Amino acid sequence: MISVDCPRCGKVWYSDDRHGGKVRLCSDCADKLRQKRHGSPFRLDAFAIVALILFAVDGLFILLAHLFPDVLAIPLVVYGGALLFVGLAGLRSCSRYHWYLADVDWDLARWPLLLALVGLACVLAYASLVLPQR
C-alpha cells in the first residue's frame, strides 16, 4: 500500500494501485466533480444566443416573405443562399482532412453547420413560395 495525497482537499488516503502516482483525487472529491459535470443539459453560451437570434431573424424574414412574396421573395433566397454557401464552405474547411465525422472538432464545426441549416431553411421557404405559384 502507498499513501496518496489528494490535491483538492489535502486528505491522505491509501491505495494498492501504484501506477496512478502519489497525487490523486480522493473518492469524495472525484464524486463531487462527477456530480458537477452532470449539470443542466442546456447551457446558455454564445452558440445558443447566436442560434436563437438567427432562428428569430429567419423566422421573421420567412413570415414577412410569405406575407409580401412579391417584395421579399428574392432577398429571402439571396440571404438563404449566401448563408448556405458560407456554411457549407466553412463546414468543408473544418472537416477537410478528416474521413470520419467522429474526427471533426464539433465545437468549431457547429458554427458553419448552424449557418448552413439556417440558409437551407430560407431556400426551402423560398421554394415553397415560388413553386406553388407557377
Image (spheres, rainbow, N blue to C red):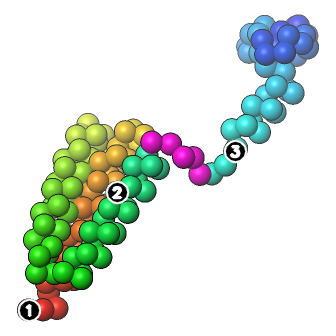
Label 3, residues with CA under 10 Å away: few <14, some 14-19, many ≥20? few
Residues in magenta? 42-46
Q: Indicate the position of residue 53 as horizontal and vertical percent values.
A: 38, 55
Camera-nearest residue between 37 and 51 = 51
In the image, what residue type sits under mark 3?
A: Gly
Residue 94 is inside the magenta segment: no
User: Does residue 15 appear anywhere in the picture?
Assistant: yes
Considering the numbered disc 3 on the image, is that residue within a helix, a strand or a loop?
loop
The CA distance from mark 3 to mark 1 is: 52 Å
Q: Is residue 29 above or below residue 76?
A: above
Q: Which label number is shown at residue 39?
A: 3
Q: Which label number is shown at residue 54?
A: 2
Q: Mark 3 or mark 2: name the one nearer the start of the chain.
A: 3
Label 1, residues with CA under 10 Å away: few <14, some 14-19, many ≥20? few
Q: What residue sits 69% from the left and 38% below the top?
A: 37
In the image, what residue type sits under mark 2?
A: Leu
Q: Is residue 36 above or below residue 117?
A: above
The CA distance from mark 2 to mark 1 is: 30 Å
- The residue where tag 1 is placed is 134
Q: What residue sits 29% from the left and 76% below the top?
A: 63
Q: Which label number is shown at residue 65?
A: none
Quarter of the picture holding the N terminus: top right
Is residue 49 shown left or right of residue 71? Answer: right
Camera-nearest residue between 5 and 100 = 5
Q: What residue sits 28% from the left and 42% below the top?
A: 95
User: Does residue 88 appear anywhere in the picture?
Assistant: no
